[in-house]
Image (spheres, rainbow, N blue to C red):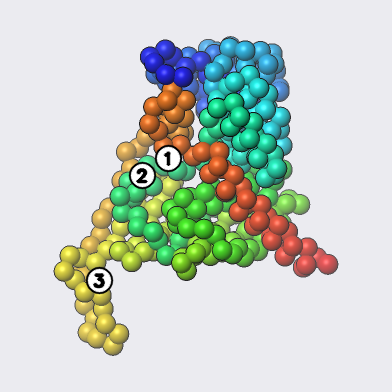
Amino acid sequence: MSGGAALPIGVIGVGSLGFHHARILRDMKGTEMVGVYDANPTRAAEVAAQLGVTAFASVEALLTVAEAAVVAVPTTVHERVALQAIERGVHLLIEKPLASTLEEADRILQAAGSQGLLIATGHVERYNSALRAAEQYLDRPLFIESHRLAPFGPRGTDVAVVLDLMIHDIDLVLSVAGREVLHVDAVGVPVLTPMVDIANARIRFEGGAAANITASRVSRERMRKIRFFQRSGYISLDFETGTGEYLRLRRGAKPLELGGPIASLEDIVERIELHGDGREPLRCELEAFVSAVRGEPALIVSGQDGRRALAVALDIVQRTENVADSHTA
């Protein structure tokens, strides 16, 4: 699609996240929010009434009037809904994870490719203002460490915490590292559900870089932090607040020598505060998707990016389940 006409777009699945997709799209310039669909007609009607949009009785009905759609249904039905939409010639933003299996992801991407349709994946943290503020300083980090902790809640407990929460940071790590994955180690523990509720993974990349990723949905506190260590310095970001800091050697300063005199940290290190622009990451993600559908330059998380994150996540899931099983045997 190109030109100045508004893009007809809808949302399939209006649970907690799908609602916010619909809320933003309703008011977004360059789009025509045609309506929503949800498998629960009562929920669809509630959202439609609250937002002043149309609730469709079926996916097929929505797809007859939409040229693009957000898929925010449970992961287990991503493939079925996506293939329906692709058959109708509809571009898609599919919430993370892209699919339940790599085979499902491949069928989605192959079908879309054969139709010349755009598939984006909803890894919204790529649009977090803290990360965008740090992008100019990121320089192929050699070590990355992330912590994503959340209090327990019913949403997302049908899958392991790796696919529910950790996959956000898997995508971030893969995109920033810019290297091929060589090896993955992981451990995970079921605590409150039959699935793994807390997990840690270590990813090693070509060239010696590594990432240590921790995710938990049984924490008393909420945390979304990531740190990058690189030759030029150290970057720490807080995705909850959209802020961070970059510490680097002051211009002209030399690294401390082993056994040499110790200067104060402030004498040799420059601290740069990082502040995001405060824009809602989900809005930035949707604007990028709409721009890409319209044929305009836009940085999106592609379907292939989503598949790559899914491949690593599924590898981690298998390893955590193997470790958990070995302790219960």
Q: Distance of mark 2 from mark 3, alpha carbons?
A: 27 Å
Residue at image coords 54%, 52%:
170
Residue at image coords 60%, 63%:
184
Quadrant of the frame with the C terminus:
bottom right
Secondary structure beneath dot 2 equals: helix
Secondary structure beneath dot 1 equals: helix
Residue that carries the numbered disc 1 in the rendered image: 127
Q: Which mark is residue 69?
A: none
Seen in the picture, residue 245 relative to 79 is either above or below; the reply is below
Q: In the image, what residue type sits under mark 2? A: Arg
Number of marks in picture: 3
* Cβ atoms under marks 2 and 1 closer than 8 Å: yes
Seen in the picture, residue 212 relative to 34 is either above or below; the reply is below
* Cβ atoms under marks 2 and 3 closer than 8 Å: no
Q: In the image, what residue type sits under mark 3? A: Leu
Q: In the image, what residue type sits under mark 1? A: Tyr
Local crowd at mark 1 within 10 Å, few (<14), some, or many (≥20)? many
Front one among 129 and 310: 310
Q: Which mark is residue 265?
A: 3
Local crowd at mark 2 within 10 Å, few (<14), some, or many (≥20)? some
Classify residue 39 by image quadrant. top right
| N-term mark: 3 or 1 | 1
Front one among 167 and 105: 105
Local crowd at mark 3 within 10 Å, few (<14), some, or many (≥20)? few
